Image (cartoon, rainbow, N blue to C red):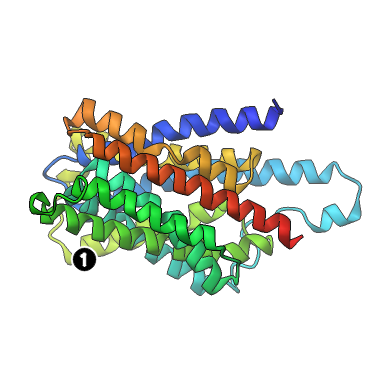
Amino acid sequence: MDRNIKKGLLTGSIGIIFVGLQPIVALLKPDAIGPYLSGAMTCLVETMIFFPIMLFEFKFMNSRTRKMNNQENQKNRSHFLKGWKKNIWLLTFIGLLFALNQVLYFVGYYFSRAIIGSLTQKTTVFFGIILGYLILKERVTKLQIIFSIVLFFGLAISITQFFTLLNIDNTILIGVGILLLITFLWMVGHTLTKPIFSRNEATPIQMVFIRNIISSVTLISTYLIFFTPNLNLFIEPANLLFFLAMGAVYGAGLICWYLTLSYLDVSKATIIFAPTPISSAIFATIILGENLTIFHLLGTALIILSIVIIMTQKDNNKILDI
């Protein structure tokens, strides 16, 4: 097996654990902390995590480039947020968008719970191909459309427990609706930033840092202005532990994702991360006492199958376009 594939499988497997833990930690939030403050502090902790990583990446990439004598490579050396002035409004919009998403994340999971919520977030592949078609003019195949329907069918089976409509909890539907909105907005942000990466004006690590610093400053400042701040909430040991844990698992999941991308292409990395609802379901059953049913498993299987087919088709489209 190729060495890069082995590394990608390793970082992806670790990432599945951290991403699977994210909704679990979110649902262990102390009652005294609301979703607004939770979102603000999660973004702040992520900012602190990614700042040294960004500096290391910048230093490493440029030191490696300086060793090369090729003049063209010198021209393409990494820059620290090159072209940020040109993209200032887009970067601000992305930061505000992810600030909103981080708050809604806690609200959505509060209503949907971990198992259904983690499955709902797998609709990213559907919104990714739709937005890629509308904004980036990427090709969409009939098979991708068919398996997008299968993906939502699997989600419906999990939510309704195979269409036992009389037993549906309306609060779960509210949570699913919020998480679908989050997933859509999340993919809007990523689709809009894709051209920045293509122009080599920023790296994904730099983008994560800049969006989180904008998000954290926005959320913390507005929290202090519009809410009645209880400063003890920031220093209470249980709250501090939650802030650090949430930021750490969220940040670690992102780090594993980008490390996997450094070894594999997007399609293969997405397929590797497809089973994250399984790890969430296991943790939710053990830690939160949620009830994992056969219909959850059936829905999960359909969703993972759909992701594999959709992303494989996306890979084949690249080959056809060359």
Residue 83, compared with residue 62, is above or below; it is: below
Residue type indicated by callout 1: Ile
Residue 165 percent coordinates (x, y): 13, 54
Q: On the rendered structure, is 285 left or right of 80?
A: left
Residue 36, compared with residue 1, is above or below; it is: below
Of 199 and 68, nearer the camera is: 199
Query: Which residue is painted at 17% across and 44% down in the image?
Result: 233
Residue occupying the far left of the picture: 166
Residue 22, compared with residue 178, is above or below; it is: above
Residue 286, visible in the rendered structure: yes
User: Circle 1: is it few (<14), some (14-19), or many (20+) Cα within 10 Å?
Assistant: few
Residue 51, visible in the rendered structure: no
Of 37 and 152, nearer the camera is: 152
Q: On the rendered structure, is 189 left or right of 264?
A: left
* Residue that badge 1 annotates: 225
Residue 121, compared with residue 115, is above or below; it is: below
Residue 182 percent coordinates (x, y): 33, 59
Q: On the rendered structure, is 171 left or right of 134?
A: left
Residue 151 percent coordinates (x, y): 39, 52
Residue 71 percent coordinates (x, y): 90, 55
- Quadrant (top left/top right/bottom left/bottom right) for the N terminus: top right
The image quarter containing residue 184 is bottom left
The image quarter containing residue 318 is bottom right
Secondary structure state at the residue bearing disc 1: helix
Query: Which residue is painted at 25% across and 39% down in the image?
Result: 295
Query: Which residue is painted at 57% across and 63% down in the image?
Result: 141
